[in-house]
Amino acid sequence: MSSEAHDRSRVEVRRSARRSRTVSAYREGDRTVVLIPARMSHAEEQRWVAQMLEKLAAQESRRIPGDEALMARARELSAAYLDARARPSLVRWVTNQNSRWGSCTPSEGTIRLSHRLQGMPEYVLDYVLLHELAHLLVPDHGPAFWALLEAYPRTERARGYLEGVVSAARLPHIPGARNAAPSPAGPDPAASCG
């Protein structure tokens, strides 16, 4: 999924006359936006896009926890918010969940998180993990389930973030659009060079 060809197919280059020397990049939904000075040649643009994709990938790989770290975090969240009652047998990343952020099988105690969560803010990942942990205790989305999540202080914020990601993915993308305004929430300046 993180192949360079895949990354390049979802890159939007935005040129700006106000930008004189710096180049920066950030993730916007499933796209990468690279901001460059308007005066750059096509060859310079290609070189900077490649460099910024590498830089973002390196930053994200440092931030993305492995399956063992996910399991450890799940145990911490269960202890902090569920009185350690939710005890998963396995927590892992999967690449076959494109319509859900996570899923669990209560009878087996397994939790699977969509790879699309990788690189999202830690509080969002924690919320999805806690959501799936709560399903180990209450399989449906009834009042007892939501009562379990009330203890997590960032539930509403994380749900809003995820709803925003879903909504942004539905917005029309105009191929070749340059000088487009950043998203209303503003860019998440994940990488910058200059």
Image (cartoon, helix red, strand yellow):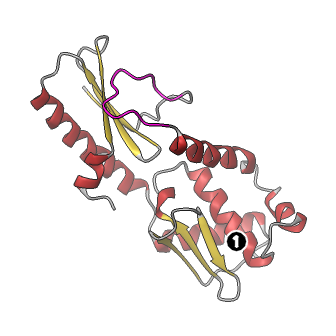
58 sits left or right of 121 in the view: left
Q: Position of residue 12 (x, y in %)?
A: 32, 35
Query: Please, which residue is most extreme toward the left here?
Result: 43
Q: Amino acid at mark 1?
A: Leu
Looking at the rendered structure, the secondary structure element under dot 1 is: helix
Query: Please, which residue is most extreme toward the bottom here?
Result: 107
Q: Residues within 10 Å of mark 1 (few under 14, many from 20)?
A: many
Q: Quadrant of the C terminus?
A: top left
Residue 6 to residue 178: above or below: below
State the residue position of label 1.
133
Q: Where on the picture, by quarter, is residue 11? A: top left
Q: Residue at x 33, y 45 (%)?
A: 10
Principal SS element in the magenta part? loop
153 sits left or right of 111 in the view: right
Q: Position of residue 7 (x, y in %)?
A: 29, 50
Q: Bounds of the magenta span?
A: 172-183
Residue 31 to residue 106: above or below: above
